[in-house]
Amino acid sequence: MPHDWLLPLASFAYLGLLFAIAWYGDRRADAGRSLISNPYIYTLSIAVYCTAWTFYGSVGRAASGGPGFLPIYLGPTLMALLWWFVLRKLIRISKQHRLTSIADFIGSRYGKSTFLAGMVTLVAVVGIMPYISLQLKAVSTSFNVMQSYPQAAVATTATTFGDTAFYVALVMALFAILFGTRHIDVSERHEGMVAAVAFESVIKLLAFLAVGLFVSFGLFDGPWEIFSRVSEEPSLQHLLVLGDRPAQYIDWLALTFLAMMAILFLPRQFQVAVVENVDEAHLRKATWLFPLYLLLINLFVLPIAFGGLLLFPDGAIDPDTFVLTLPLTAGQGALATFVYLGGLSAATGMVIVATIALSTMICNDLVMPVLLRIRGLRLEQRADLSGLLLGIRRGSIALMLGLGYVYFRLIGESYALVSLGLLSFAAAAQFAPPILFGLYWKQASRLGAQAGLLAGFAVWGYTLLLPAFARSGWIDFGFVEQGLFGIAWLRPYALFGLTGLEPVSHAVFWSMLANVGLLVGVSLFTRQRLIEQIQATLFVDVFHRQSSEAQYWGGTARIGELRGLLTRFLGPERAVAVFKRFARYHEEALDDDSIAVPALLNDAERELAGVIGAASSRIMMASVVQGESLSLDGMLKILDETSQVIEYSRRLEQKSAELERATDELQTANLRLQELDRLKDEFISTVSHELRTPLTSIRAFSEILLDDKQMPSAQREEFLGVVVSESERLTRLVNQVLDMTRMDAGSIEWHFERIDLAKVVDEALRTIKQLLAKHNATLEWVRPDDDVIIEADRDRLIQVLINLLSNALKYTPKTGGKVAVQIKPGQQWVSLTVADNGPGIPPEQAEQVFDRFHQIAHADGSKPQGSGLGLAITRRIVEYHGGSIVVDPEAVEGACFKILLPVVANPPPELTATG
Amino acid sequence: MNGSAMSQRLVALFVLGALVLGYPLLSLFSAPTLVLGVPLLYLYLFGSWLLIIVAAAVLVERSSDERTPPG
């Protein structure tokens, strides 16, 4: 480079631009106008997958192994097709439970286990550290290449303070701290950071395309020329094919699998794809846009690699640096600088996202659980812990980058880029079994996940990490060649004598076997705790449930204590906002002294989980909630898989019961109809019979009168009298039948008015006077002193009285007959009795007398006069007045009919007031 | 088309893609010959890669059109 100062300047200017973009993104987010809420930014942020390893390493790998670099990108392409199926579920669950990291996710799925979350964090930190140092190495190498050209890049021998990588690490730490831990956020989303990462993804793609086009068309006559020259070069021909050994296809498969897992389960990918996701719907476009991005960034890998091999046949130039050395050789300094910035983008993007993701995990799942358990710190009594949380995160970011730098200085030099990257991929793949089984298999248990993760991690460490240490000279390399303690079947690259595979494929096979095997095996033979079962159900069935169903806090807590807890971790402002939102949503006043409802407890736990992780949140909640922490009701609702089926069958039962009831009613109605039909027939036959009797006698007497002209006039008169009286009886009968049917049909007209019952009786007695005399009976009339006011139809009431009185007279003895009428006023009812001294009514017939056409025979067996409808009509009329009529069973002699009628309430109050 | 149908079609495409980009189909194209000036293996790999992307795009975009009827 012509000017030594130009490159550092460009580097830091570029990083400054990133700061500006991130700052702008955060400001837009604060203003509520998100910069990143669209599928394109989302896709570009996922492209943080393409790191410096892609940028420099792919060419290096292609130059040595031909198509071997492609599975790293074909795997994610295939996985992207499953995103709508898998990633959407991850996002939905994480949003619902406020999960902010992969450790949180796994810990939460397996019963909010602090231990498991901590373990995941450890695996992640140990596994990702080489990857971070790889990025630093890439930046440092590329810087040296740029600075020292045309001499070949020399290995870094500079002191720490003279080393570019050191300063780059510093700036990245600063960026991550500024934009990754700006404040404690309940959703842990960092819009500014995402915006910057998306911008970097654009830059690295453009830079790589630019250098690809330059090599293909600037240095050569199109990629066709490159390919045809390579195919003519015998030493390079092997790069065009995959080889014949099946083991190579197993390596291909293993790499594809690793990359598939890495795109989902690398902590930084989880961060951008799940935690930073704004809208599930963005997944749709990302499903094909992200593979397209991968395709484009790989399009020129082969032309560059082959072009480099053709132009530098002696192998003096490291293929990892072809993207820089090719333009530099051609004197294209500006293009080389642009490419260098692209590589810087790729490296910084990865480091920033990875350290932020890891710092959240270290803080929430490693440090906080420990701090909260140390009683001596009295952490739960501090007023505001959000500062402490931020401090821990910032500290861990600095620590991560520091460690990454140290690792790079100690080990990085001895290793090609690609091997370091695959080391991390294989570590991240250990998260796949607990997550994928956890997403679809409810029985996957905490113990199983722990055993599997532990075993997988151990195998990974033994077969990949330790040999890496050995290669850099930390451990005796003999351990790799002869095996631990010289035992041949413990050789880390050929465990149990398995040979023929690449170290990575070998490690993937054994670690996955251990991980999946133990996860499934242990899960099958252990019982889950209750909280595990609940979480498993909530996770697996996330699409079949309302988020509000996830409520199972059963204990009680004072709202004041809850408020205190949230304030400590969220800060006063956010805590107040949480309570306000809840109060508004549930329309409840939240006094500090009242008991929090379960829904509020669950809300609080979720909010807290967003800040300190699900496991710690649960511990903190348990410190304020008293009593049974799980409500039986809530649990059963969640756990009972068949509850919906039961609900459905319960409804079916209800329906069938209703149907049965309706059928019963119909049957009853039918029976009643049949009975009525029978009654009607009976009625008609009785009426015909009753009509025929007087008609027969009228006809008989009329014929006698017609035939016998010489009949004495006295006899003739007597006969005519019989005809007249029979006709009257006939008329009466017809009238009563008409009355009866009209009453049945409801077509009778009633004229209700307020009347004095005693006066009505007087009137009836006047009418009946002659009849009384005819029967030689005496009347006893007990009249009350006061008026007895009732509401009634006067004419009908008189009809009732006449009916009863004439009935009574009918049964009185020929001499000494006696009829008694009495009114007894009461508070609500007035009783009216009509008694005679006849033979009386046998108790068993006391009800039947009110039936139609029921007549009690005289003592001599003869039928009394009358239609047999009188009492039936009487009862109808009395009942229409709201009263009742019965045969008084206490009558001493003869029959006594007792009528009860409602008395009209006292006169209206205004009358008493004025009077 | 609802999300579930789309999801199923994408899973089917995944299975197809895994077959196309894996052993043994891949070994059929592992020959050091040039087709259209490009090595056969690379032409096959990048070609099927592009086809998978196009198929995924068609599946996803068509389904989102159907999800929101015009007007």
Image (spheres, helix red, strand yellow):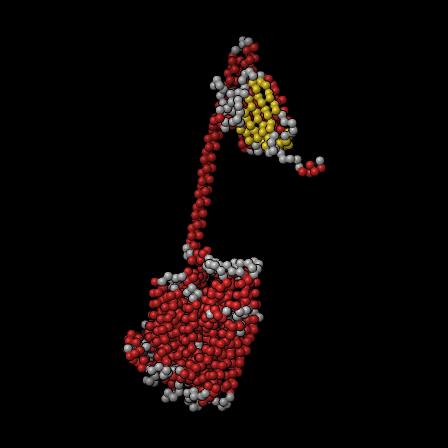
Q: Is residue A307 above or below residue A371?
A: below
In the depicted structure, whether residue A642 falls above or below residue A286? above
The reply to whether residue A47 is in sight is no
Closer to the camera in the image, A138 or A636:
A636
Percent across and percent down for residue A599 are: 51, 59
User: Is residue A861 in view?
Assistant: yes
Foreground residue among A565 and A866: A565
Q: Residue at x 53, y 15 (%)?
A: A702
What x and y, as percent, mark residue A340? 47, 83
Which sits in the foreground, A747 or A152?
A152
> Where, by quadrant of the figure, is residue A305 drawn?
bottom left
Asked which quadrant contains residue A136, the reply is bottom left
Residue A194 point in image, percent of width and height: 50, 74
Please tell me how many numbered marks the rendered image carries.
Answer: 0
Is residue A555 shown above or below A181? above
Q: Give the residue displayed 51% in from the left and 72% down from the top.
A: A389
- Where's the C terminus of chain A, which quadrant? top right
Residue at the extreme front: A376
- Residue visible at 52% across and 85% down in the picture: A9
Horizontal and vertical percent position of residue A679: 48, 30
From the viewer's side, name the closer residue of A88 and A215. Answer: A88
